[in-house]
Image: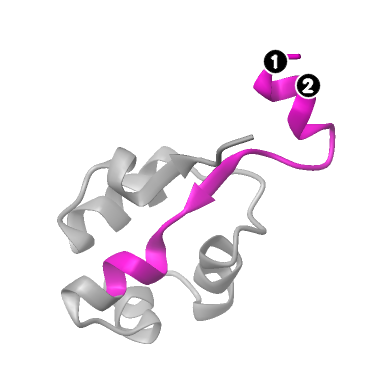
Amino acid sequence: MTPVELAGENDHLVECRLDELLVRRDMTLAELARRVDMSVVNLSILKNNRARAIRFTTLSALCRELECTPGELFSIRST
C-alpha cells in the first residue's frame, strides 16, 4: 500500500512541527499570529495537525517569520 492509501480519505501523513519551532524561536503562537496576520485559532488548527490545506502565501509568511524552510515546518509521519 502507498502512503496515500494508508492515510485514508479523512487522514493524512503530514505533521506540523510548529510547536517545536516556536519553542526554538522563543515565540508564542499569539506573537506568530500577529506577525503573519493570521488568527490564533487558525494557527492552532495547523499546530494541532487538524488543517487540511495551507496556502503558499501563508506557508511563505510562516517560514519567513520562523526563519525556516517548509521541510522544517512539516514532516511526513512514519507509517
Q: Is residue 55 visible?
A: yes
Is residue 4 covered in magenta? yes
Q: Residue furthest top?
A: 1
Residue 6 sits in quarter: top right
Q: Element at badge 1?
A: loop
Q: Residue furthest right?
A: 9
Q: Whole-Å distance between the Cαs marked 2 and 1?
A: 5 Å
Q: Are marks 2 and 1 in contact (CB under 8 Å)?
A: yes
Vertical placement of 43 versus 56: above or below? below
The span shown in magenta is 1-22
Vertical placement of 50 versus 3: above or below? below
Identity of the residue drawn at 27% across and 77% down? 23
Identity of the residue drawn at 59% across and 67% down? 48
Provide the residue designation for mark 1: 2
Identity of the residue drawn at 40% across and 51% down? 58
Quarter holding the C terminus is: top right
Residue 34 sits in quarter: bottom left
Name the residue nearer the viewer: 4 or 64.
Answer: 4
Residue 38 is left or right of residue 11, and the answer is: left
Name the residue nearer the viewer: 46 or 58.
Answer: 46
Is residue 68 covered in magenta? no
Residue 25 sits in quarter: bottom left
Q: Element at badge 2?
A: helix
Name the residue nearer the viewer: 1 or 46.
Answer: 1
Provide the residue designation for mark 2: 5
Query: Could you tell me residue 39's position as x and y percent?
Result: 50, 75
Residue 36 is left or right of residue 74, and the answer is: left
Query: Could you tell me residue 52's position as x and y percent?
Result: 67, 46
Residue 53 is left or right of residue 68, and the answer is: right
How crowded is the residue under tag 2: few (<14 C-alpha within 10 Å), some, or many (20+)? few
Quarter holding the N terminus is: top right
